[in-house]
Amino acid sequence: MDTDGQLPERDRCSAPTEGPEQRSRSVRSTVAGWAVRWHGYGPWQQAGVLAALCVSFLLLLSAHVVQPFMIPSGSMENTLRVGDRVLVNKLAYRFGNKPRRGDVVVFDGTGSFVHGERPGGAVTGLLREAAAAVGLAEPAETDYVKRVVGVGGDRVTCCDERGRIKVNGVPLDEDYLSPGDSPSRVPFDIAVPQGRLWVMGDHRSDSSDSRDHLGEPGGGTVPLERVIGRADWIGWPFGHWTSLSRPYGFDHLSDPSVPGAGGGHG
């Protein structure tokens, strides 16, 4: 019996349309195509493509992870000096965490410290923002860097008989203040609303901060949603390289959500 004649003829040249081998060939073909195109570019074109890729990567990194921020004034001396570039951690408060007392934060002061639209045209604004995003230009005039002194639910007052600021009735030991500065020459007594922050500069005599906006909407406090991120490191200049740790003076403060916390107003 001729069994070979009864079997359908198999196409020995056919290849599977799906599977790892076919996908591998497709990937190799795509890579080879890009390689041919790349070698077809001149040196200046290749340099332009690489520069565009680097800038795109830096902008994405700055927009979502870490943003360099140029310090434009002396309001945070001596912790931060004019011209320092701090690296702002944009993931610090993304996963349920909130700013804590003692954190150095960068925030958009629109609606709290600044009222009205940002100055400048659209094109100028975009170019400035792109340069500021990689630390090559000063930040927008509405962006600020300050230290969190009070969070939602706190009562912050100035000052006790020794001239110290108190949070929930407990005096602060502020060893980070600029030498020669007093904690505040402006008396105040503020109950920080939930979802907002009371912020101050470390160079109190040269800082426009929450104290300067007591009579405005929000009483000088900053909404949490306006916080851009936490300043965690000084990245430039090389001589100032350091991490920005939370001062120990805030560790002993009571949680305002605990009944009876604070021990009076003093």
Image (tube, rainbow, N blue to C red):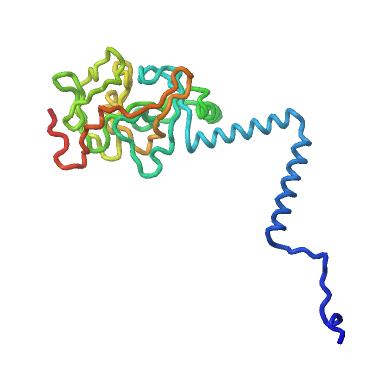
Q: Nearer the viewer, residue 215 or 233?
A: 233
Could you say where residue 218 lies in the image, as x and y percent from the top left? 28, 33
Residue pictured at 33% horizontal, 19% vertical: 207
In the displayed image of the protein, which residue is found farthest to the bottom?
1
At 45% from the left and 28% from the top, the residue drawn is 87
- 10 shown above or below 204: below
Instruction: Identify the image quadrant of the N terminus.
Output: bottom right
- Is 150 situated left or right of 107 in this image? left
Residue 31, how many percent across, how many down? 72, 45
Residue sitting at the far front: 1
Quadrant of the image occupied by residue 188: top left
Q: In which quadrant is the C terminus drawn?
A: top left
Instruction: Classify residue 228 as left or right of residue 15.
Output: left
Q: Residue at x 19, y 24 (%)?
A: 158
Where does residue 248 sit, x and y in percent of width and height?
27, 28
Q: Name the foreground residue: 249 vs 159.
A: 249
Exactly how many numbered labels are in the figure?
0
